[in-house]
Image (cartoon, helix red, strand yellow):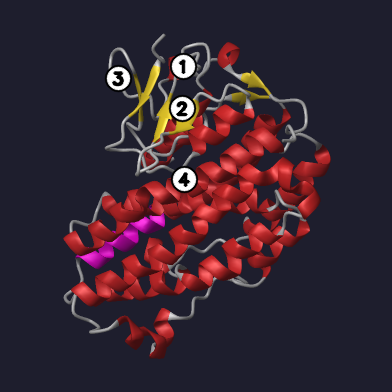
Amino acid sequence: MQPLLQDFLDKWVYPTGFSGPGVDFRLRQTERCIPLWDKLVTQAIQSAEQDLKAVSDEWKAARARAGYAAEGPFMSIKQMSTQILSVTVDEQSKYIDLQRMRARQIWDEVKHGQLHADVLLRGGWIKREEELMNDARANTQPKLSYFGMTAMFPHIHPLARAGQHYYIEAMACLGISATLSVIDDPLIRHQLRSQEAEEMMHFMEGKYQIDAYALTPEDQKPIEEVFDFLLRPWVSEPSRALGGSA
Amino acid sequence: MMPGLKIDHEKCTECRMCYVACREIDINAVIVSSTPKHLLEIDERCIYPKCTVCLMYCPVEGSIVDANSGRSLVPPPPEVWTEEMRWPRTAAPKCA
């Protein structure tokens, strides 16, 4: 196992404040995630090492455009906002804290798009952010159904999204750590460090919601189905922004 | 009585995970301060070290510290999340 992954597991995954079926369920799903998390760390390190050897700086722009496509208003509206809507009025009192966490993430994701635009602006690849609207590389990304199926998860059950938070946001955290361990460019490091804590918070949303709320088979089933979907090899390819090839 | 934990505002991102967790177990020791920045604070209702739940879900290293020693408790050191320190969760979430 990659040392970065072991460190992440020991510090952020395994510590838990609760005992019970939610924690047991999360730890079982964690065992399914670990091989793919390990693969992601390996890929991210290799990708960063390759970028370091590049003759030009284009790799920085490529990462930023990919990040802009995957994060920003699209992510915020299509994924985060729909999650708020997954909680019915009758369920508000039960899931109000979950909604507040997701409401915060609405802002986080919009801001993350700005961080990627900042790299392109300050690096001189664009003069104004509006130029990105005409650049397909900054507006498309190949992750399967990223803004389709994965935006539909919340409509199944208010907790369903917790599976995606847990698995995907862990990859965001690991991708950031892996890239920071290699890349010394100040522009890229600034962008990664600026969102590091927030990605960890998004991971913690998933961890907390599963530990605290996924207590019955009925609550766990939609979350498990999310893991079933996301852990297929053709879904889990990480974004170029995090060191993958997607 | 002084709370056992303190928030380091240089590190804290105000994500409110500690507030949510503390509220969920009905201790309610994390409050929003009545200052223009609305910073989160931990008050005397905190029962640390008997409870360490907030430490398990805080996402920022160094955000919550031992109020006496200043030692960072995020990420939580192994001795603060032993089996007997966990809150059992077998019931459905509370309703407001």
On screen, residue A119 above or below A160: below
Measured as percent of width and height from the top left, residue A133 is found at 40, 86
Amino acid type, mark 1 = Val
Q: CA distance from mark 2 to mark 3?
A: 13 Å
- Numbered label attached to residue B55: 2
Tag 2–tag 3 contact (CB < 8 Å): no
Q: Position of residue A5 (x, y in %)?
A: 42, 41
Residue A148 position (above or below residue A205): below
The CA span between labels 4 and 1 is 20 Å
Q: Amino acid at mark 4?
A: Met
Mark 4 neighbour density, 10 Å: few (under 14) some (14–19) many (20 or more): many
The answer for how far apart the CA atoms under marks 3 and 1 are is 13 Å
What span is colored magenta in the figure?
Answer: A42-52
* Front position among marks 1 and 2: 2
**Dividing the picture into quarters, in which one does residue A219 lie?**
top right
Instruction: Identify which residue is drawn at 27% across, 37% down.
Output: B10
**Label 4 close to label 3 by CB (< 8 Å):** no
Disc assigned to residue B80 = 1
Q: Say which label, 1 or 2, has the lower sequence index.
A: 2
